[in-house]
Image (cartoon, rainbow, N blue to C red):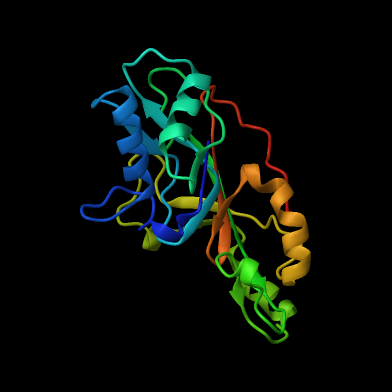
Amino acid sequence: MLSYDGTAYHGWQVQAGARTVQGTLVQAARHRFGADTRVTGASRTDAGVHALGQVASLTTAARITAAGLRGALNADLPRDIRVLDAREAPAAFDARRAALGKRYVYLIDTGPIASPLLARYAWHIPQPLDVAAMRQALAPLRGRHDFGAFCAAPGARSGSRCGCRPTATSITWRATSWAARSWSAAERETLRGSGRSESRATASGQAPRPPPRV
């Protein structure tokens, strides 16, 4: 499980001529464990995305313990990318194919003055929001729908139908209240510049325990 500040990266996926999170991980992993080492993410993130709980699988022929792998990578990776947890998985485990779901929470700072501590993580709108209208507009998205229009190509195995359900208890947070209570749940989330997403995967095929809510 990874945590990273994506400000300096052009998203997750490897891109020619661009600094990406996956590319940086692969470079560090191959330096330590050999050129055949592969890194697969459970989900892609765009430029400006900050991960607090991105699941990824690393495949290598090197003989090393999970704790040793975590320590070796953290020694070589830049400080804005950290390996929080590493566990052994079956040889066929693939983080992307084993992903069980994703969660997105978009943060809005409605304080009169933008908080500099939230500048990377929240969209600043310094006026009151019509929260009731926002909730009403979101209602049609709940449930199971065909999101094929958002796909480059339908998935070969599961198609493009996905379930969408609300998980947040509030739509907006003021900067002070969000900053005071969000970091305690940081280890299980993925944070976007104006929102947060969370991806989950399991090597055993059983659903993991849900992450704590902010």
In the foreground, 119 or 127:
119
Provide residue 91's location: percent of width, then percent of height.
39, 18
Asked if residue 94 is positioned above or below residue 143 in the image, the reply reads: above
Provide residue 146's location: percent of width, then percent of height.
46, 57
Q: Residue furthest top?
A: 63
Provide residue 4's location: percent of width, then percent of height.
50, 48
Examine the image and state in which quarter residue 139 appears.
Answer: bottom right
Q: Residue furthest bottom?
A: 127
Left or right for 140, reference 214: left
Examine the image and state in which quarter residue 24 appears.
Answer: top left
Q: Is residue 137 visible?
A: yes
Asked if residue 65 is positioned above or below residue 25 in the image, the reply reads: above
Q: Is residue 88 visible?
A: no
| Number of marks | 0
Q: Who's the residue at 64% across and 42% down the image? A: 187
Asked if residue 58 is positioned above or below residue 181 in the image, the reply reads: above
Left or right for 19, reference 8: left
Provide residue 195's location: percent of width, then percent of height.
57, 63
Q: Who's the residue at 55% across and 66% down the image? A: 120
Q: Residue furthest left?
A: 16
Quarter containing the C terminus: bottom right
Asked if residue 198 is positioned above or below residue 145 in the image, the reply reads: above
In the foreground, 214 or 131:
214
In the foreground, 171 or 159:
171
Q: Who's the residue at 68% across and 82% down the image? A: 113
Q: Who's the residue at 46% across and 51% down the image? A: 161
Examine the image and state in which quarter residue 157 appears.
Answer: top left
